[in-house]
Image (spheres, rainbow, N blue to C red):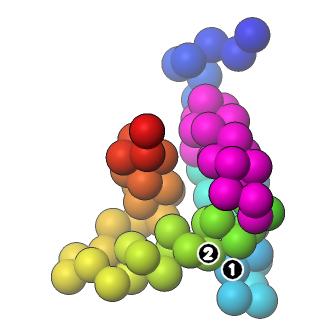
Amino acid sequence: MTSLYHPPVKRSVEIAGHKTSISLEPVFWDMLKAAAIREGVPVNALVARIDAERLEAQTPPGLASAIRVWLAAKP
């Protein structure tokens, strides 16, 4: 089992046709994958949706932070 305090892992995702790198701790990558499965979409599609939501904020956070917040807000 991976430690909860493992350093962030950088992975590439594709959003709106372009690749970007996101650094998240393994526990967040696991949560993101599980959320994508629950929602019936690929991880890239879920990240794109979170990205679009964060850009609507008056002061958008970074993408990695937005993903963590989105995951924490889900039951």
Residue 21 painted magenta = no
Residue span colored magenta: 24-41
The answer to whether residue 18 shows anywhere in this view is: yes
- Residue at 43% x, 39% y is 75
Please state which amino acid type lies under the numbered disc 2. Answer: Ala
Residue 72, position as x, y percentages in the image: 40, 41
x, y (%) of residue 47? 62, 66
| Image quadrant occupied by the N terminus | top right
Q: Amino acid at mark 1?
A: Ile
Tags 1 and 2 touching, CB below 8 Å: yes
- Residue 16 % position (x, y): 69, 88
Residue linked to disc 1: 15
Is 35 in front, or is 54? Answer: 35
- Inter-mark Cα distance, 1 to 2: 5 Å
Residue 9 seen in the figure: no
- Residue at x-position 39% and y-position 74%: 54
The label on residue 48 is: 2
Around disc 2, counting alpha carbons within 10 Å, would you say few (fewer than 14), some (14 to 19), or many (20 or more)?
Answer: some
